[in-house]
Image (spheres, rainbow, N blue to C red):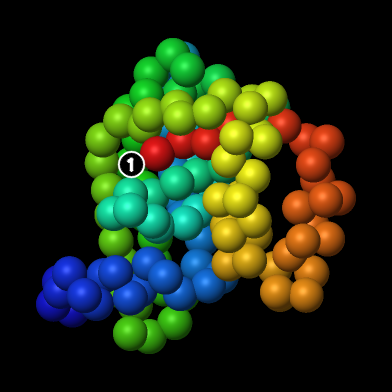
Amino acid sequence: MPPLSVSERDEFLQQPGILCRIATIRPDGAPHVTPIWFICEDNAIYIPPRAEPSWLAHLRVDPRVALTIDDQLAPYRKVTVEGAVELLYDTGDDDAWRERYRRIACRYVPAEGAEYYVQETIDQPRALLR
């Protein structure tokens, strides 16, 4: 499969329902991979972890990650990223970026249920990573 062009990549990253898999590094050096919701905006990937996942704790110690975003069906497109995450908002600062979270929810929950989902999970603080 040939590499995606920039426009093909950007179009692919806007498709709803596709998960991102984030690989972090455990304290013992072992890898840890988790599927997570994401959104691509402003030429960056944004990820909204809840407060309790172990992989968020891993990133607080070592911000290096690898991301894979891929199709499960043909034509099997994929985007991979390696680098370091930036913690834009820590858990508890959710109100500062709630509109972006609504847009993320709309990628995974049907439009009529996205606001309900946001309101039903508003008591579960999230961070925002880029």
Horizontal arrangement in the rendering, residue 108 relative to residue 45 (left or right)? right
Quarter in which the N terminus is drawn = bottom left
Residue under numbered circle 1: 66
Q: Amino acid at mark 1?
A: Ala
Horizontal arrangement in the rendering, residue 66 relative to residue 17 (left or right)? left
Residue 127 percent coordinates (x, y): 58, 32
Answer above or below: position of 62 versus 35: above
Q: Is residue 50 visible?
A: no
Q: Residues within 10 Å of mark 1 (few under 14, many from 20)?
A: some
The residue depicted at 58 percent of the width and 60 percent of the height is 103
Horizontal arrangement in the rendering, residue 79 relative to residue 50 (left or right)? left
Which of the pair 92/52 is nearer the observer?
92
Q: Is residue 82 visible?
A: yes
Answer above or below: position of 42 versus 2: above
The residue depicted at 58 percent of the width and 40 percent of the height is 97
Q: Quadrant of residue 71?
A: bottom left
Q: Helix or strand or loop: what does disc 1 sit on? A: strand
Answer above or below: position of 109 versus 102: below
Q: Quadrant of residue 107?
A: bottom right
Residue 10 percent coordinates (x, y): 29, 69
Quarter in which the C terminus is drawn = top left
Horizontal arrangement in the rendering, residue 28 relative to residue 3 (left or right)? right
The residue at the far bottom in this view is 74
Answer above or below: position of 122 versus 8: above
Residue 92 percent coordinates (x, y): 68, 25
Which of the pair 73/40 is nearer the observer?
40
The residue depicted at 21 percent of the width and 75 percent of the height is 7
Disc tally is 1
Residue 63 percent coordinates (x, y): 37, 24
The residue depicted at 26 percent of the width and 41 percent of the height is 82
